[in-house]
Amino acid sequence: MTFPGLDRIEALARNLDSWQRELAGKMTELEDSSAEGVSDSGLVRVTAAADGTIVSTEVNARAMRLDSYTLAEEFTAAAKRAQEAAAARVRELVGEVMADAPGGGRPAESSRPAAASQLPDDRPDWY
């Protein structure tokens, strides 16, 4: 007797080691990654780590001519851009890992039972 899913399970098991190595490499890449954000004027540059932590700032000497309110806005804009870029990089790396994961290319099946989708419209989903 053969089991229809057995070949698929065996193939996944054979590929698991290489996928784990790839995952470890992506995790290292993620830990080492950072992103930069620059203010509109270009006078303030901020670097953020993958987790959004600000790791460095650079202020052009001309920024010292700005009033404190404007300088604060420059820092805020640069930091926000750096954190957004870091988050985008994380999403990109996670997306690559998930696409390469065993079974990652398959569309997700609905977690909702088939009978639940046949409920009359006036009933809540949880009914």
Image (tube, grey):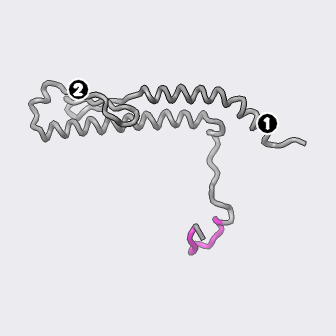
**Are there few (<14), some (14-19), or many (20+) residues within 10 Å of tag 2?**
few
Can residue 31 be found in the magenta stretch? no
* Label 1 residue SS: helix
Q: Which residue is mark 1?
A: 7
Occupied quadrant, residue 61:
top left
Marks 1/2: CA–CA distance:
56 Å
Q: Which residue is mark 2?
A: 58
Residue sitting at x 17%, y 25%: 60
Q: Is residue 15 left or right of residue 30?
A: right
Q: Main secondary structure of the magenta part?
A: loop
Image coords of residue 6 (percent x, y): 79, 39
Occupied quadrant, residue 31:
top left
Image coords of residue 96 (percent x, y): 54, 33
Q: Which residues are magenta?
A: 116-125
Q: Amino acid at mark 2?
A: Glu
Residue sitting at x 55%, y 28%: 24
Residue sitting at x 76%, y 34%: 10
Residue sitting at x 18%, y 39%: 72
Sequence-first disc among 1 and 2: 1
Image quarter in which the N terminus is found: top right
Q: Amino acid at mark 1?
A: Asp
Q: Is residue 47 left or right of residue 117?
A: left
In the rendered view, would you say 29 is above or below 122?
A: above
Q: Is residue 100 left or right of residue 93?
A: right
In the rendered view, would you say 122 is above or below 95?
A: below
Image coords of residue 15 (percent x, y): 69, 29
